[in-house]
Image: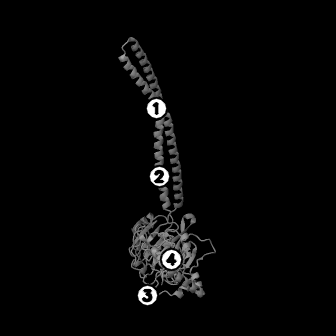
Amino acid sequence: MISRFVKRKRKQTRRQPAYLIIAAFAALIAAGDPADARGARSERSVESVQSRIAGEPMMAIVSLQDQRITVYDANGWILRAPVSSGQRGRETPAGIFSVIQKQAEHYSNLYDDAYMPHMQRITWSGIALHGGPLPGYAASHGCVRMPFDFAARLFEDTRIGLRVIVAPTDVAPIEIAHPALLQPKPGAIASAAARRAEADEAAAKADQARRAAAKAYRESTQASMPVRVADNLKRRAETQLAAAEAALGSAASPEAKEQAERTKAQAVTRVAELQEQWTAAKAELQPKLDAVAAAREAALAAENARIAAVDAARQAARELEPVSVLISRKTQRLYVRRAFEPILDSPVTIQDPDRPIGTHVFTAMEPTDGGNGIRWSVVSLESSHPHGGAAEPHDPARGHRAREVEPKKTEPASAMAALDRIVIPQDVMDRIAGITPRSSLIITDEGLSSETSKGTEFVVLMSGEPQGGIKMRRRAPASEYPYARARDRQLFWGRPFAGPFSTW
């Protein structure tokens, strides 16, 4: 296959004729085979629910077997399109991920500057969802390619943290209720609103106190003017008095001595008058200075109260943010993360711990009962070869047929059985923040993948499934990973076209 991407800018000139020939050849083939052209266009189609207003995407499920992605909100699927996942030896790993980075213009530094528009990263080692050509079968190096227009639309609709489930087979979430499912803390929403109101009130008081302190300072500044004037005049009169005393001491004649004594007497009187004025002005100024000190203390206290109220409001708001709870049968531990940061790690009891429990993703969808309860859904992941046999190779014809078939809904029995076996200590329950929409509970036989690190949600890989697309990659922290760098580079051809004439 010949790549349509320009590897180096300096090679564009001498390769231009070759690209033009390839473009003309592709156009001739498309014109000569209307069926293929229609197939290419159908690969770019975006399916969506038209009978209702779509809500915010809550999860995306990629079916490796059916080569399809389906995006769900709280009430069902809203977007659906074909995909091309990792080819044999570079398979997209099945498991549980989340979007950890978004970049509208992205080029791979691993694969010959490959164009990856509307990239949504799910691992720091380089697995991502992005726009790309769809040949009709698994053909990528581990990423999930989507139709270009679908990738653009999905990019606009999603946000960091979107749950992405890569499933061996196509499966749909189903609503579930169980006593073990976590619930919102009573009054959490009202408490957060109250803390926010208190913070607003504290901010208003702090602002008022700052204004009062500024006013007191201005008044003290104005009151200090008579003091400074009286002090300057008094110092000048004292200088004149000293000069008169010096003249009196050096007077030689009686007339000169008499004149010096009169000058001295006038200077003494003037100093005494100015001293009285200075004392009166100083007495008038002192209350103003005391008011400034008191106003500043009040402003400082109000600012400290504002900071405390803001911190309390922020903490209350954080308790309304989604949390992710993962329970691993492998490690017999419970983990909690919020906003990609670990906040709790504790032992947990799983009854009959030697028996498999499966992998189940429970998602809090929307509040009920005025915010005192919440609706949950569940997706249970099943192996593509449940009886221990080898994974069946993907059949392109089957994939095309599967796109017209609704995903199989999760059977709730195994998820209910998994919840029945979990025993969370009460002190741990008390430390888990209240559950809000988009929160999740993951119960799995697996341990945490090494991809779970700083700047990620929980990453769980299904053992027994091909993982070639991730095993060949080197994981690096978000702050060090060069794969996310932006490129100020243009494609030789304006808009990529979907079809079998390009490689990734």
Instruction: Give the numbered dot on residue 228.
Output: 1
> Which residue is denoted by mark 2 in the rendering?
307
Dot 3 crowding, Cα within 10 Å, few <14, some 14–19, many 20+: few
Left/right of residue 199 with respect to residue 427 in the rendered view: right
> Which residue is denoted by mark 4 in the rendering?
379
Inter-mark Cα distance, 1 to 3: 96 Å
- Mark 1 or mark 3: which is in front? 1
Q: Secondary structure at mark 2?
A: helix
Instruction: Find residue 166 and report its horizontal and vertical position in percent.
Output: 48, 78
What's the amino acid at mark 4? Answer: Val
Among the two numbered marks 1 and 3 on one chain, the one whose residue lies closer to the N terminus: 1
Inter-mark Cα distance, 2 to 4: 43 Å
Among the two numbered marks 2 and 3 on one chain, the one whose residue lies closer to the N terminus: 2
Instruction: Find residue 134 and report its horizontal and vertical position in percent.
Output: 52, 81
Inter-mark Cα distance, 4 to 1: 80 Å
> Which residue is denoted by mark 3 in the rendering?
390
Inter-mark Cα distance, 2 to 3: 60 Å
Left/right of residue 33 with respect to residue 230 in the rendered view: right
What's the amino acid at mark 2? Answer: Ile
Q: Secondary structure at mark 4?
A: strand
Among the two numbered marks 4 and 1 on one chain, the one whose residue lies closer to the N terminus: 1
What's the amino acid at mark 1? Answer: Arg
